Image (cartoon, rainbow, N blue to C red):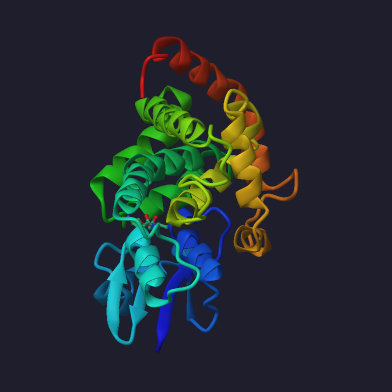
Amino acid sequence: MTLEVYYLEETDSICSNRVVVTLAEKGIDDWIRHKMVLMSGDQFTREYLALNPHAQVPTLVHNGSVIRESSIICSYLDDLEPDPPLKPADPVERAHMQEWLKLFDERGYEATAVINFLTKFRLAESIEKLEERWKFVTNIDRLYRQQSVIREATESPYVMRAIGAWETIFKLMEKALADGQPWIMGEQFTLAETVSAPLVKVLEMLRFLDFWLAPYPNTRAWWDRVAARPSMQQLDTFPNNALDEDSPHAVAGRKTAPAFREKLDEYRAKFAHAY
Ligand SMILES: N[C@@H](CCC(=O)N[C@@H](CS)C(=O)NCC(=O)O)C(=O)O
């Protein structure tokens, strides 16, 4: 079998890292690496647009068949190799896992993208570079979201939405993990981990988890278990990691944390009832 993966080698590339982590968890290492660089415009070449007309990374090509969308790619990879299974065998459990994936795709993804723009992109990239990038954005929602966050910072309504998304996710996770089992689906480590952990990783890079997860001890312990896995640790070997306290993420996170925490407190005061 030939597996070709178009991916990014950056610690904060949330969608691409879902696939990189899933491949590692499945023990698949004979994939052909097509490393892309977004800032060089690799996603806009004629060859890549033929594979992925949204100009988004990642893309998987398996024996010539093209598979797009990170969570769909992860599920497809799980179907290719039986061991270790990353989906529950029981159909009800499988459906419940799908609910989690839907939540991470529909809310977690955008929330993390917003927070990454609010912090690292807003404070470490030049506005000229961002404006150049916006000329080529293929999706109007993404464009408006990025511009709002860069221009209005924590006052952007997208920031409150991002906080709401993660608050919902963390509350649900806290409940799911309250029975003392290690993973979201219980004893079994699944796609619910490989699809969510790269998103949470960005919050860790920004040093936001210590304050954000303070009311969620089960989720904090879950994160510590996930982060210790070799599949996740490899992300810290990529360029643009945030191990160093002087890294762009650590610096931007520190600068943004006070205003961000005010918004988090405001959300918690106003939406204590929300899920
Ligand atoms: N829904 C897509 C989203 C993929 C996505 O947004 N990828 C980012 C990189 S992590 C990207 O390609 N961004 C293109 C850009 O910013 O120009 C998926 O899950 O695969």
Front residue (pair 10, 209): 209
Q: In front here: 67 or 130? A: 67
Q: Position of residue 82 (x, y in %)?
A: 43, 74
Q: Where 98 sits versus 21, above or below?
A: above
Measuring 34% from the left and 42% from the top, which residue is drawn there?
103
Q: Answer whether residue 208 is visible to the viewer in this image.
A: no
User: What quarter of the picture does the N terminus occupy?
Assistant: bottom left
Vertical position of residue 271 compared to residue 240: above or below: above
* Figure quadrant, ligand 1: bottom left
Q: Nearer the viewer, residue 124 or 31?
A: 31
Number of numbered discs: 0
Is residue 229 depicted above or below 140 in this figure? below
Q: Residue furthest top?
A: 269
Outermost residue on the front side: it is: 90
Determine which quarter of the picture holds residue 99: top left
Percent of width and height locating residue 54: 26, 62
Give the residue displayed 56% in from the left and 21% down from the top: 261
Residue 179 percent coordinates (x, y): 53, 35
Left or right side of 137 for 211: right
- Quarter of the image with the C terminus is top left
User: For the point 64% across and 62% down, which residue is it?
Assistant: 239
- Tell me residue 220's x, y (percent): 62, 36
Q: Does the image show residue 119?
A: yes
